[in-house]
């Protein structure tokens, strides 16, 4: 069915064009995950990356280009909330969105990051139920991790330098908040407890599960604060994070298990795929596809110069750049910078 203001609905749920939006975004492995599932399930769809400069542009491009949906990564997860038509209960609580589903330009926002954390932990043999959990950082990823852990039965404390910023969220969720410091007790009546610090930023030895959602370099794990029964989950799967230091053989020098951010990515994507298509993802196929990292020179790029062109008109590039008003030289500079950030070349 077609009305005067919308494009035809896809013939089947899941058909269409999808993208992950971010800045930077070329490092994302989401295209490998979703395209492998589209192929497996015979869905006429394609997933790419879109580099843009504002959360408002994320929504404008989805509507203007006729995308069926997409994912949102740094730095737009929080800001994109204000331009969506509806939110799932978890997305509303967290105040951040990582998955958008479009129905003829009506945009619904979801947050599957909590599922990603718990799925990655369960895969590694760690059930959060009844465990003491520390979440470092209170951005969109940190808040989502806290929701996932609380939903799974974990006893959660969120560590953030500005506890006032997340007091309302923590109260609704029913978790504790803490700030880094040396005092054992700051304000019990407000539910704020300090986390003792040793030579590293925070004392972490008393927690079973530690989730790091801070940028690389902001927090460095001190091995003497840890023990073999603990597990660290690092949201970052790019070089420089704690999980990245672990290497393929787990040679991080830490006595505890380290769960890499790509496991988080995989498990949040399975829930997003269900939202896109109504179908269950095959994690074995997704995992194999995620391991494939294209060479920089093999990534086809294209410039979005008119947000009203349908996505299909751009073909199937690995990167679309929101480049209205840029000349060829500026476009090349942008794509070169993206490749440098993603691949270090």
Image (tube, rainbow, N blue to C red):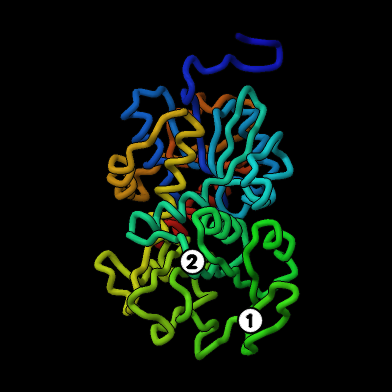
Which residue does the image show at 47% across and 79% down from the upper left?
A: 206
* In this view, 238 is above or below 255: above
Picture coordinates of residue 263, whole percent (x, y): 38, 54
Mark closest to the chain's N terminus, 2 or 1: 1
- SS for tag 2? strand
- Quarter of the image for residue 89 reads top right
Of all residues shown, which one is farthest toward the front?
130
Residue holding disc 1: 194
- SS for tag 1? loop
Which residue does the image show at 51% across and 18% down from the upper left?
A: 10
The N terminus appears in which quarter of the rendering? top right
Picture coordinates of residue 280, whole percent (x, y): 39, 33
Picture coordinates of residue 201, whole percent (x, y): 54, 83
Q: Is residue 240 visible?
A: no
Q: Is residue 175 visible?
A: yes
Picture coordinates of residue 133, whole percent (x, y): 50, 68
Residue holding disc 2: 211
* In this view, 198 is above or below 330: below
The C terminus appears in which quarter of the rendering? bottom left
- Quarter of the image for residue 87 reads top right
- At label 1, counting other C-alpha atoms closer than 10 Å, the crowd grade (few under 14, some 14-19, many 20 or more) is some
Distance from disc 2 to disc 1, alpha carbons, whole Å, reads 17 Å
Of all residues shown, which one is farthest toward the left?
249
- The answer to whether marks 2 and 1 mark residues whose Cβ atoms lie closer than 8 Å is no
Which one is nearer the viewer's eye here, 208 or 112?
208
Which residue does the image show at 56% across and 41% down from the upper left?
A: 99
Which one is nearer the viewer's eye here, 223 or 236?
223
């Amino acid at each position: 069915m077609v009305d005067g203001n919308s494009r035809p609905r896809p013939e089947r749920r899941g058909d269409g064009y999808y993208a992950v939006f971010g800045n930077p975004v070329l490092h994302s492995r989401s295209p490998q995950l979703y395209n492998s599932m589209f192929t497996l399930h015979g869905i006429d769809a394609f997933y790419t990356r879109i580099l843009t400069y504002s959360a408002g542009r994320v929504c404008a491009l989805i509507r203007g280009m006729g995308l069926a949906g997409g994912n949102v990564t740094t730095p737009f997860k929080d800001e994109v909330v204000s331009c969506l038509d509806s939110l799932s209960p978890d997305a509303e609580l967290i105040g951040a969105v990582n998955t958008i589903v479009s129905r003829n330009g009506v945009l619904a926002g979801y947050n599957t990051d909590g599922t990603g954390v718990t799925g990655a932990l369960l895969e590694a043999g760690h059930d959060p139920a009844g465990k003491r959990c520390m979440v470092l950082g209170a951005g969109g990823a940190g808040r989502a991790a806290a929701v996932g852990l609380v939903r799974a039965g974990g006893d959660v404390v969120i560590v953030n330098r500005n506890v006032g910023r997340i007091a309302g969220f923590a109260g609704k969720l029913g978790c504790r908040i803490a700030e880094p410091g040396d005092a054992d007790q700051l304000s019990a009546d407000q539910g704020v407890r300090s986390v003792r610090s040793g030579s590293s930023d925070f004392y972490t030895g008393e927690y079973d599960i530690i989730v790091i959602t801070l940028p690389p370099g902001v927090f460095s794990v001190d091995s003497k604060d840890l023990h073999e029964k603990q597990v660290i989950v690092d949201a970052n799967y790019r070089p420089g994070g704690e999980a990245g230091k672990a290497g393929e053989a787990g040679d991080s020098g830490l006595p505890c298990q380290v769960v890499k951010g790509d496991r988080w990515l995989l498990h949040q994507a399975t829930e997003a795929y269900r939202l896109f298509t109504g179908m269950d993802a095959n994690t074995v196929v997704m995992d194999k596809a995620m391991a494939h990292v294209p060479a920089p020179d093999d990534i086809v790029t294209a410039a979005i110069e008119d947000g009203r062109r349908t996505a299909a008109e751009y073909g199937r590039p690995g990167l679309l750049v929101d480049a209205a008003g840029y000349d060829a030289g500026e476009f090349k500079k942008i794509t070169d910078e993206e490749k440098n950030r993603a691949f270090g070349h």
